[in-house]
Each structure stands twice: as C-alpha cells, then as structure tokens.
Amino acid sequence: MRRIYSQLAMYEKPDDKNFELTVFERDTGDLGVALFQLSANGDRDNKEPKRVARLWGFPLRRIRNRVIKALRDSGCEVETLTEPNNYRLEEERGVKLGLLFMVVKPLRKQRRIDELTDTVRQMSNEEAYYWYSLCSRNGYGKRARRAFRILFSEE
C-alpha cells in the first residue's frame, strides 16, 4: 500500500496531537479515512506512524458526524469530509476515534453501529484507553474487538 499519511508529521515538533486522520480517495472513486498513531514524546526519528484503522463505505457514512466533531474538537477547521486531506488530532480524541473505527468496520447493521458509536462517545477517557489498548494489540485485538461488540451491542 502506498503511503497516505503526511510526510511532514514526522518532522514537526512534539505536541499533544499524536494522531493523524487522513482522508483519501479509493480506487473506486469514493473517499475513505485512515487513522495513524504518531510516535509519542518527540520520538519521531525511529518509527513511521502506525496505522490504527481504515474505514470507508457504509460504516463511515454512519459515523461521519462523529468524525467531523472530533476534528473540530481538536482545533481543525472542517465542514465535511469531501476531499483528500490530513488532520492532526489530540490523543484523547484519536484514541476514541481509533476504537470506534476498529469496532464498527465489519458491521452493516445501522442499529449496532449507532449503539457502539453512543457507547464510545459516553466512555470516560480511562475506559476508552483500556479498550483501545486491548483492541489494537497484535494477536489479541481481533478477539477484543469482537468482545467489545458483543458486550455493548447485541448481535
């Protein structure tokens, strides 16, 4: 896959915006989003950003307003997600968006997507960090994401 994150993010000074949301155009012509976690604490010289999740299609259309609200809350001036662009996010908002992207990606039922969106929105930061760490862990994340979906939204 070609690199779709901002090359400039690797060279900027450290701040509290440790996530980057990239809006990209897919081969089919529609737009998708990818969320990247940048290296923390100014340690940007030895790692490329880690892709947390990508999302497009129906799940993205259902949570588009949540994505736009998170971008605005992080200080980005955005009205709609209609063209390719890169946006920097504060850590708390990036964690919640990453968790939301991971758990709604395989879903097709509106009700379940809406329930999980509300659940993530209402979570405390500590609870969101806990679930984010479980769901993004290599080897265990797939089971944790399924457990999250079952626990917070009936099948």
Image (cartoon, rainbow, N blue to C red):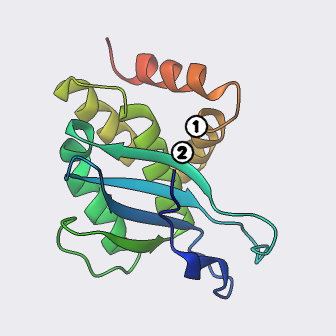
- Residue 43 figure quarter: bottom right
The total number of labels drawn is 2
* Left or right: 17, with 112 as reference point: right
Residue found 26% across the figure and 45% down from its top:
60
Mark 1 lies on a secondary structure that is helix
Question: What's the mark number on residue 61?
Answer: none
Residue found 40% across the figure and 73% down from its top:
86
Residue found 60% across the figure and 47% down from its top:
129
Q: Which residue is mark 2?
A: 128
Determine contact: label 1, label 2, CB under 8 Å.
yes
Outermost bottom residue: 13
* Left or right: 150, with 7 as reference point: left
Residue 42 coordinates in the image, percent (x, y):
76, 78
Estimate how packed mark 1 is, as few (under 14), some (14 to 19) or many (20 or more) residues with alpha carbons within 10 Å.
some
- Is the residue 3 above or below the residue 59 in the image? below
Outermost top residue: 155
Q: Amino acid at mark 2?
A: Ala
